Image (cartoon, helix red, strand yellow):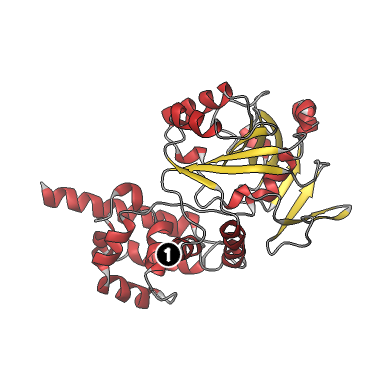
Amino acid sequence: MADATSDGQTHAVLERYARFARDEAPGRSALYAEWADGVAAHPELAAIIARVPAARRQPPLVFAVTRMLGAPEDAFPAWAAWLRAHADEVVAAASVRRLQTNEPQRCAALLPALATIDGPIALLELGASAGLCLYPDRYSYRYRGSGGVVALDPEDGTSTVVLDCEVTGDPPLRLPRVLWRAGIDLEPLDAADTAHRRFLTSLVWPGESGRADRIAAALDVAAADPPTLLAGDASDPEVLRAAASQAPAGATLVVTTPGVLPHIPRAGRERLLDAVRTLDAVWVTIDPPALHDRWEPAVDAASWGGFVLGRDGAALAAVDPLGSFVHWRAWRTGATDAAG
């Protein structure tokens, strides 16, 4: 029975990595496509990865862990030889890690929604990782549209983190005034911790030019003025309410869920969304259009053209989930009141 189970796990890895090589990595990382294709062709390597718990053996996570531990960013034979020599170390490290991609570029997509909110805000991000999306007021932005470039900088000058974003439509663009910033995560990461920093930068796929440098610069911003990061399950209403209760008076509480909801099982996701609606807070999110039915009015997923940037269920814009474009559509959805 144990052998049959092991064989089944190995077969699942072979299929998963073949699919990743075929459908997910091309166009984003040629090296990851090569590594995944190699794993799919070598059952002995798949058997090593099958020793990692199923929820933690995704190709981007396993590959990131190997790079974090020192695997060469080289052709498949060199990487495979390294994996064989460090199998136990990789299995142990991957078994306690999970995907915690923290992309500050998402702030370029969040900013137009935040700009619809008057007055100072208190930011509470769910699934915050190291909290890099809690600093929309500390980054610089270059929104590029048909009318030219809209440049936004903090009061003290151009930030070390400059976010370029293509924009269409006429979204409100201004930096928010953030009085308080906090996040909830199952396993928060410390921007000042060397090991945590290495893990986050290792999650950047080889070939994604500029991302590692941008994340490193954002980690410096967060380390210089750390947010409040709370360990807990944000889908637990009591955890959420306890965190929200720490927000200061005199600021509008804004709960953000940029990219985290797809990673929460449906029951927990629905529980979380119901709990958010009970708070005296504005909810800002970036979600796949078909993920839930909270859009008012409903969004046509087939024609939307990206993820949905939403405020309190009103769909404001089609956005790149990692923040490279914003196509403002509030006028199409009837969300003009939310857009301010």
Dot 1: element: helix
User: Which residue is most to the front?
Assistant: 249
Location of residue 92 in the rendering, given as x and y in whole percent from the top left corner: 27, 60
Q: Which residue is mark 1?
A: 195
Res. 279 image quadrant: top right
Residue closest to the eye, 115 or 38: 115
| Residue 124, quarter of picture | top right
Give the residue at the far right of this rendering.
147
Q: Is residue 236 above or below residue 194?
A: above
Work out whether 194 lies above or below 310.
below
Type of residue at label 1?
Answer: Ala
Q: Residue at x 51, y 34 (%)?
A: 243
Residue 248, image x, y percentages:
63, 35
Q: Looking at the image, which residue is at 71% across and 39% down?
A: 114
Q: Is residue 306 visible in the rendered structure shown here?
A: no
Camera-nearest residue between 191 and 337: 191
Corner quadrant of residue 87: bottom left
Picture quarter with the C terminus: top right
Rendered position, 181 above or below 10: above
| Residue 206 x %, y % | 51, 68
Point out the residue furthest to the left here: 1
| Count of picture labels | 1
Residue 193 seen by the camera? yes
